[in-house]
Structures are given as C-alpha cells and as structure tokens.
Amino acid sequence: MKGYISIIFILFFVNLFAQEEKDIIKQNSFQLDFGINQIKERNLHPKVHGGISYGLTYEHTKRSKNTSNFGVGLVLSRLKTEYEDLSASVNIKLSGNYSYIFKVVNKNKLVYSVGPEAVLYYNFGFYPNWDESHFYWADYLELGIANNLTYKINKNRSVEISLSLPLVSVFSRPELNRQYKIDNISFNGILDNLHSNLEGGTIDKSFIAFSRMEYQFHISDRVIQAICYSYNYQRLKSKEGFSFQDNQHNIGFKLYF
C-alpha cells in the first residue's frame, strides 16, 4: 500500500493544473469537526471504546459541467471503555480522497451527481490499559461511488447531501497472534506494520460508508459558510482475526473561499 500513498496526491495535482475551462469555478474549504467516536477492536477484545473526536479537513473543488474534489483529513479521538475512568486510549485517522462526479439530474433547484471515488485511509489505535506492547490499525485503499444531491433554497442558501459507498478495497489489519511481544516503534517499523497483511475484498470484508449533510449560506460573493453533520461507518474483516468497527457522528463548521 506504500505506493498508493502518492496516488491521491498525483490525482490532486493533475486536477489542480489541468487545462483551464472558461466557466470553471474553484473552491477551497476548511472544516472543523467535533463528534463522538465509537470503536470495537475485536482483535483486542469485544468491548466498545468511546469518546470525543476532533477533526480538521481541507478540500479543493473544481466545478464546471462536472465536479472534481480532492480532500485530506485528520481526526484525533481520546477513548475509553465503560470499565475505565480515564480516556487513556488514542485513535488517529489520516485520510485522502479524490472524486469526479457527473451531473445526471439538473432540474431547477435540484442537482444530483454521481461518479467514481478513491479513498486512502489510515486508522491507528493504541490501547495502553489493555495492551501496552502493540498498536492496532485498520487501513485501506478503497474504490467506490460518490453521490451528491444539492438543493438550492435561494440565491444565498442551499442544502447539500453526499454519500460515498464502497465497491472494492485493499486493506491491512494486524495479525491476531503477534510474532513479537513488543511492536517495532521506530518510524519505519510503524510504517511497515501499517502496510502489512494486505488483502482485497468487497463489501463482505470491507464496508465503508461516508455521509454528510451541510447547510450552506453566503456571507459575501467569495466566502461561503456551512454547518455540517456527518456519519461515517467502517467495518473490516480479514481472513484471520476478528472484525474492526468504527462509528463516527460529527458536527462541523465549514468555510469555503
């Protein structure tokens, strides 16, 4: 999966420096999220880790006849089970995605678009109260379908709903029984682990869904604000070992410029 890290960024720069179109609209945005994260890492135990999450996302969008979008994101969560008093566990998520969607419905105020999407996602967890010698991860490169529905309320206000669903993916999960008592915590050791035990799958092994609804309102000709709600769900199950599940509910504030 190491080679795939650059794929998202190559697509972004191709998108960024592609030949200009006369009617093209470019937008950048930053989104700040606060939410609730629930994780069940069954390779560790079947208990649910829950807690508060904080996220930051950057997106670059080009709109013309069709729409291309590149995004990168970071989410940090402090987690605990119902048996713990303090949130000692940590979860870090790094992501990159690229989509290219086509308008298939364009009626008055309503626009529906659909197209392919690629997502690269790193989900890294450390649970010191339960296993202080090992890290846990659920990483994947996924190819799927991006859907977007936009309803324009008036000139300055609109509602946008997006849904991403998987088709196929390549993913990495830790072994159920580790060969070493302690993981290699060097940078190269962590990087090697995050790209180990690769296997492919469809929705029976890796079901990943991202949904978002945002209410947009213009504060000037160049700046748009939005209030967002998102729900994300991930489930990965390798040939050996138990499943990993991740639920996220987020409320966010987004600024387009």
Image (cartoon, grey):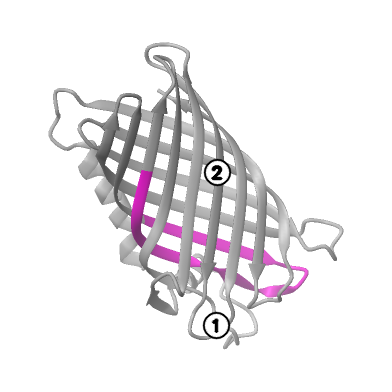
35 on left or right of 211: right
Viewer-nearest residue: 62 or 198: 62
Q: Quadrant of the N terminus?
A: bottom left
Q: Which residue is mark 2?
A: 230
Viewer-nearest residue: 101 or 92: 101
Question: Do the numbered discs 2 and 1 sit on residues whose CB atoms are within 8 Å?
Answer: no
Picture layout, residue 63 above or below residue 192: above
Residue 219: x and y, percent? Answer: 47, 13
Q: Main secondary structure of the magenta part?
A: strand
Q: Is residue 220 magenta?
A: no
Q: Quadrant of the C terminus?
A: top left
Residue 187: x and y, percent? Answer: 50, 65
> For the residue marked with disc 1, what is the amino acid?
Glu
Q: Residue at x 63, y 79 (%)?
A: 182
How far apart are labels 2 and 1 at the CA level? 31 Å
* Sequence-wise first label, 2 or 1: 1
Name the element at disc 1: loop
Q: Residue at x 50, y 37 (%)?
A: 213
254 on left or right of 59: right
Q: Residue at x 62, y 64 (%)?
A: 125
Give, as a single range, the part of the protein colored magenta.
119-147
The quarter holding residue 104 reads top left
Residue 175's tag is 1
Q: Callout 2 environment at 10 Å: few (<14), some (14 to 19), or many (20+)?
A: some
Picture layout, residue 163 above or below residue 239: above
Residue 13's tag is none
Q: Callout 1 environment at 10 Å: few (<14), some (14 to 19), or many (20+)?
A: some
Picture layout, residue 155 above or below residue 97: above
Viewer-nearest residue: 168 or 180: 168
Residue 44: x and y, percent? Answer: 68, 76
Direction front: furthest residue: 107
